[in-house]
Image (spheres, rainbow, N blue to C red):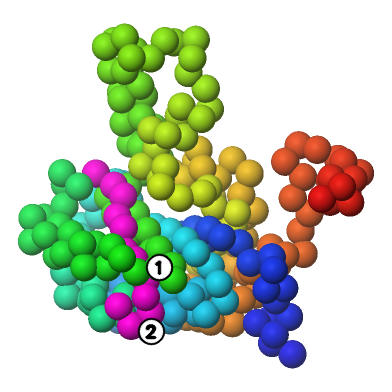
Amino acid sequence: MTYKEQLDKNRIPKHVAIIMDGNGRWAKQRGLERSQGHQQGVEAVRIVTEEAVRIGIKYLTLYTFSTENWNRPDDEVAALMGLVLSQLKEEIFMKNNVRLRCIGDTTRIPKDVLAHIQNVVNDTRHNTAMTVNMALSYSSRWEMQEAVRDIAHAVQSGSLQPDDITAETIDAHMKTAFMPNPELLIRTGGEQRLSNYLLWQCAYSELYFCDTYWPDFGCEDLCKAVWDYQQRERRFGKTSEQINLSEQVD
């Protein structure tokens, strides 16, 4: 029996975030250029996006390019930006009724790439099956800095009092305020760290690490991660007894 066949359709996480790691190592193992690994990684995005729609995930956030990735060799950065420009196909989203959104420091993204992204974002804005959120030129520290700056301006203008700042206030100033926090975060490629990704939002996310390099990550890999998530008890600081009692009341 496949992992997909074992999934509880009533417990599919609404929001799954993925750190798509291992493109370069996948290419190196095969004697290929790193850019070829990234290109194969784009195909994995298509496969996983389509499967996520099929199993009922509503939000899929993909760590596409971090702010730290700007420090990579110029030719690799150029190749990555070129892939976004050439491989971000509107028909993939339209065929699957998927909406595209993008978060990150857009001031650093080349103008032609940014214009292309915005076109796809605009053209898919009415799609309803799922939202793919592309984290491009993104890092949590950058996002938190932006949120703190916005809140400070609100306090300075008198529209917000310091004592009124709550966790909900910070949530509202995050770039991800339009969607729920991830229930599940997946990282491929064998590393076990968050790499400056959705640190605020993943405070209570279930973490799933696998050795599979991103270009080889497919439908069954996604379903296995979701199945693993479904085997866990999410307590949010409570005891198992409290969780069970709450479920009985509901």
Question: For the point 59% across and 40% down, which residue is it?
Answer: 203
Q: For the residue marked with disc 1, what is the amino acid? A: Thr
- Horizontal side of 143 relative to 107 (left or right) equals right
In the rendered image, which quarter is residue 102 located in?
bottom left
Q: Position of residue 137 (x, y in %)?
A: 27, 50
Q: Position of residue 117 (x, y in %)?
A: 19, 62
In the rendered image, which quarter is residue 154 located in?
top left
Question: For the point 51% across and 43% down, which residue is it?
Answer: 201
**Can you identify the residue that label 2 sits on?**
30
Q: Is residue 79 above or below residue 50?
A: above
Front of the two marks 1 and 2: 1
**Can you identify the residue that label 1 sits on?**
128
Q: Is residue 100 magenta?
A: yes
Q: Is residue 4 above or below residue 161?
A: below
Which of the marked residues, 1 or 2, is nearer the chain's N terminus? 2
The residues colored magenta run: 94-105
- Horizontal side of 243 relative to 230 (left or right) equals right
